[in-house]
Amino acid sequence: MNLTELWHRMGSPRWFYQMSGPWGTGFATLAVVLLVVGTMWGLAFAPADYQQGNSFRIIYIHVPTAILAQSVYMMLGVAGFIFLVWRMKLADMLLQVMVPFGMGVTALALFSGAVWGRPTWGAWWVWGDPRILSMLLLLFLYFGLYALRAAIPRAEAAARACALLALVGLINIPIIKYSVEWWQTLHQGVTFTLTEKPKMPIQMWAPLLVNVIGIYCLFAANVIIRLRGEVLRRESGTAWVQEVVATHDQARRGHSGDSGAMA
Amino acid sequence: MFRAQLIREWRASVRSRDEILNPLVFLFLSIMLFALGLGGEAHALSRWSPGVLWALVLLTNLLSLEGLFRRDFDDGTLEQMVLLAEPAFVPVVAKILVQWCFSGALIALLTPVLGLVLNMPMTAWPVVMATLAIGTPALSMLGAIGAALTVGLRRGGVLLALLILPFYVPVLIFGVTAASDAMAGLGVNAQIFALAGISMLAVTAAPFAVVAAVRISLEQA
């Protein structure tokens, strides 16, 4: 199969639905294993920081959610671009199902940051810090996308409007990235990237790496499962979806007939 | 073509005086609320004036943007404009330019009045006027994207604020720090360059997004 063909297939909701059955559960299992291992390792076994003591351990929640908060928005922008250029229906569905997850991790990153800020800086919330501010703005951008889709009654117009807004919002990502250099204040520099050798000792960053990969798996599982639902909802008029539903119903009926409890 | 469009928009704006005046009255009314809220103390008001001024300028601009496409959208003129014009952003840019003349530029010209009302030291006025003049084009341009996206919706006002205010924040930050640095007697070159950069980026890139947004709204009508 050449690349163009693969590209066209990927745009087909039906192909996605038929292929992705095992992916969701696969990623979900992986996510649970990685997050449990990473969090336990980080909270209980990693060495304490020589300055911050045990309070630094919230890094194992804060950094993964903060990374996801930014990269999910970047993916939104890419999905919006793909939808505007190639009108790929799946890209719009992806855009729609990624927004709530992005909103959730952004809120979690802000919350864990506040909890971490209290013992380290002595304040829950510091308005002067650029990265807190950009994170908060990111939360509002997610909310804007969510509200815009809810406000436009026609699905096709809502899809294009959201794609455009996601693309425009992508301007905010460089501001987040470079804000540390623009308005240097309290926030420590970026502690962790996947591409450079970290400054922390390996005992500290290994669990962090596990958690980062784990939360990406959680994201993938969440998006795939919700995307499958969205595909069924939007394509509900087509023959293949009705077929899927019919076989599912049959299977369930057969199952409940056996056990007699589900009816 | 651009000139004809500009003249049309200018006339339309001048003839609907309330659309220019209402946001300005809102601006002064809200300044009064702040003055009352801060206890009427001249010193307190002066200290917070950069922040109060810029935050209110953002909101005032948003108010005047809400009507940017409304009338032409409702009577179908906008559709004809975007269909006929080549390139399509000519009428759109003319509209935004006129909107800016009666919001951002007008507010910049009113700086002395605002400075007096807000008790700003006179030495800061030139900087405030310059930053208002340089920063507000970005507000009009970015806001027009939101105005175009929400023009077809029945209750677009709150949504417009929700969508656009996050994009206004960099302008607010540089504008406020410029005004307060000027009041403290510090140099403000950095902020002015940053504002100019943001405005130039917005002026060059935003029209394409505005036209795309107008098309989306027209399609759904």
Image (cartoon, coloured by chain):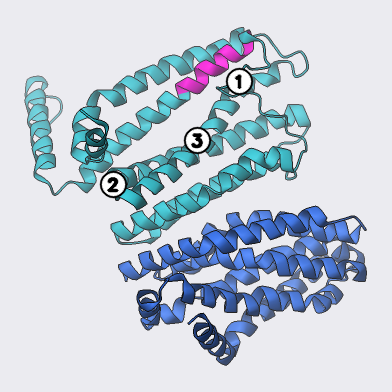
Q: Which residue is mark 2?
A: A88
Residue at 31 percent across and 20 percent down: it is A26
Relative to residue A169, is residue A241 depicted above or below? above
- In the rendering, at what x and y percent does residue B185 appear? 93, 58
Residue A209 part of the magenta-drawn span: yes
Q: Earlier in the sequence, mark 3 or mark 1?
A: 3
* Front one among A141 and B2: B2
Res. A129 visible in picture: no
Per the rendered image, the range of residues in magenta is A203-214
Is circle 3 on the same chain as circle 2? yes
Question: What separation in Å lies between label 1 and label 2 (alpha carbons)?
Answer: 35 Å
Chain in blue on the image: B
Residue at 55 percent across and 10 percent down: it is A41
Type of secondary structure dominating the magenta stretch: helix
Amino acid of disc 1:
Glu
Q: Is residue A117 left or right of residue A80?
A: right
Most extreme residue toward the bottom is B15
Q: Which residue is mark 1?
A: A196
